[in-house]
Structures are given as structure tokens and as C-alpha cells.
Image (cartoon, coloured by chain):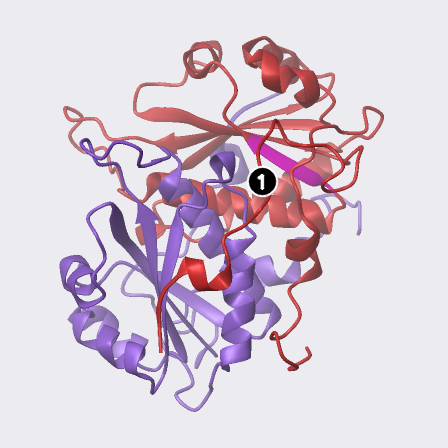
Chain colours: A red, B purple
Amino acid sequence: MTEETGGPELHPALAQRFSPVGFDPEAAVSPAQLDTLLEAARRAPSAGNSQPWRFVVGLRGDEVYSRIIPHLARSSSRWAVSASLLVVNLAQVHLEDMPGWEYSEFARYDLGQAVAHMTVQGLALGLDAHQFRAFDRDGLAAEFEVPAHWEVTSMTAFGVAAHAAGEVASAGTSRDRLSLDEVTWARA
Amino acid sequence: MTEETGGPELHPALAQRFSPVGFDPEAAVSPAQLDTLLEAARRAPSAGNSQPWRFVVGLRGDEVYSRIIPHLARSSSRWAVSASLLVVNLAQVHLEDMPGWEYSEFARYDLGQAVAHMTVQGLALGLDAHQFRAFDRDGLAAEFEVPAHWEVTSMTAFGVAAHAAGEVASAGTSRDRLSLDEVTWARA
């Protein structure tokens, strides 16, 4: 840790991460690595330990992976099919008439955390990740019989990036960030 | 990385993290360390790079910290006042009649990710974290003039844990987790 101007160094994994739009189609994620990724998500904190997350996981070439692919939007199917692993991230949702269903208002917040832990673990395993929403939510829900009190919230593609950060524009989305001052609402 | 049964090792930071209910009241977070924590959050991914997060940050002893304290619930004030740093996490919210306001349905999900990145960075700096909701949301919003299109979603207390994991029951909440099978909705 260096204490010079600018603060201690950012953790290298957090500093170097980016969302690739192309993965090495030869790279594979092993079932054991997948276990570790799920383990990272499973141990994430959640409001009242509600653990409002579930995951559909497909390793390239397996049956779940091939059932996910047809539900990708055209935009994501261009690059996501080269991922070694596709994860569909589910969050609890509120249902008015479901007494006893322990919905947490932090379901999506907590899912975001669990996915973040999974991606940090991925970086420790040499895996890059790209989260996205370009898929048929209803189609995936039907495909995997996801009941109404769960939502198909997002997907994560894991693999080995086939390009450097900034080398390929990510679907026209800027990677620019607000400044530290801009994200800081109040500070003494 | 070991490839024996059970998968590669979980990243030590993720494996060892827990939410302390007591912090060393002598430990301090420096402004430079705070910069690095905010930097970790700032660089987190978000839907369409929307960055739907803002942070109110108080270092123990400073003015912002002392303005946060009165809004803690009795339950959290028992332990959170020993934290070296209190962060109030704000997420964008939807407003019907605010044309041009770029609300993302992933605001809370993305805030969860940004907070997770901040806590992972904290672990790299030797700082434990406890996220909580036991505070007066409206009171904090008024105190820091948070407008209606932002929500005071959660708080994070950072510091050096004053006890080991599992040594103190966290407000009666179990730390047990669902099994890997239970969080896996579908897998080949």
C-alpha cells in the first residue's frame, strides 16, 4: 500500500477489469471453476441474510448453454456466444398475493453484490466478465420454468477477453466515469 | 490455483469477509484511503454506464460523520459509532414526471455492485465492512438535501473488526448460507 497523493493503490483486479465484447472461443471454464464462482456469490452479504439470488449456469457446449443461446438478443449474440460460461442471474421479486414469501426490497441490490463477488472471483481465476440485459427475459423465464416470484434480471458472460480494454467499443457505450467529486454527494 | 475436488480456492478476501458488529474505535481511515474506496466504486460496471450511484462519506470525527450519527436507528448506533468511516449509499430512483431523467431499472443492482467493489477494495486495505438499513431514510435525505429522484438506499460502516467472524451474533441474523445446489437454478 502506498500512501502518496492519490491514495493507496486500487486493487489490480478492480483497476484492470473491463467488459469485453469478444472472448477467446477456445478458452474453457471447468466445472470446478464454476463451483468456485458460485461459492463466491453464495457467500456474498445480503439484507437479513435473505440470499435473494439464484443462477442458471451454462458451460459452452453443455445443454443449459445451448438452451440459453436462442434467447439472446441479436446485439449480445454477436459476442456472447464466444463466452466460456453464461450465467443467468435471478432476483426475488415482490408478489402482492403471496403471503409468507419473504421478499426483500434489497433483492436487486443484493443480486448486484453477489454478481460482483462472482466477477471478482472470476478475475482471480483469470476470467473476464461482461454483464448484459440484451436477452429475452420472458423467453428465458419460460425456458427454465422460473416462477413469477423470481425475475430474470441480468446475464453475465465469463471468459478470457479476446481484446484489450478500450480496443473495441462496447456497443457504443462510453467507458468514461464521473469524477470522484461527482459521485461524492457530501464529504467534510 | 488448485484444481482438486471442490474447485479452485476462493479468493481469501471473499472467503474471510464478514459483517462485524463492533469496530476498533482507535482505528482510522485516512482521506487517501477513502479516495481509493470511492475510486473502486466509481469504476464499477453499470447498465449502459449509467453510474446510478452517489455517496455521502463521513470519517470519524469529521462534520459529515457527526451529521450522520443522529439518524442511525438504536440497533445500529450501538456498533456503527465505532466505525472509522460511514458511507451513505444513494441510488437513482424513478420519477414519473421528470422527463429527461435517465433512470435505469438497474439502479439498485448497480449500486449493490459499486458497494461490493468498495468493500472488496476495503478488504485489500485491511478494512472490514458492515452494510445496514437501520437508519432514518427520510432524516438522512433531509440532512443532506437528497432530492426525490435519489434514494438513501443503504449504509456501509468501514473499520477494523473488533471481533472474529461468528464471535458475536450479528443482530440475531444467521450467517448460514444456502448450498451451492440451492442457489443453482439450472445446471447441466
Residue B130: image location, x then y, percent: 39, 65
Horizontal relation, residue A9 to residue B169: left or right: right
**Secondary structure beneath disc 1?**
helix
Whether A159 is drawn above or below A81: the answer is: below
* Range of residues picked out in magenta: A127-131
Label 1 sits on residue: A38
> Any magenta on residue A140?
no
> Any magenta on residue A130?
yes
Residue A174: image location, x then y, percent: 58, 38
What residue is shown at x 66% (from left), y 22% (from top)? Answer: A80
* Residue B171, image quadrant: bottom left
Viewer-proximal residue among B46 and B172: B46
Viewer-proximal residue among A114 and B65: B65
What residue is shown at x 69% (from left), y 29% (from top)? Answer: A21
Horizontal relation, residue A169 to residue B77: left or right: right
What residue is shown at x 34% (from left), y 87% (from top)? Answer: B61
- Disc 1: which chain? A
| Quadrant, the C terminus of chain A | bottom left
Q: Is residue B11 visible?
A: yes
What residue is shown at x 24% (from left), y 73% (from top)? Answer: B68
Horizontal relation, residue B129 to residue B33: left or right: left
Please, what is the dominant secondary structure of the magenta stretch?
strand
Viewer-proximal residue among A171 and B14: A171
Query: Hey, what amino acid is under mark 1?
Result: Leu
Q: Is residue B165 visible?
A: no
Pointer 1: residues within 10 angstroms few (<14), some, or many (20+)?
A: many
| Quadrant, the N terminus of chain A | bottom right
Query: Which residue is outermost to the front?
Result: B100
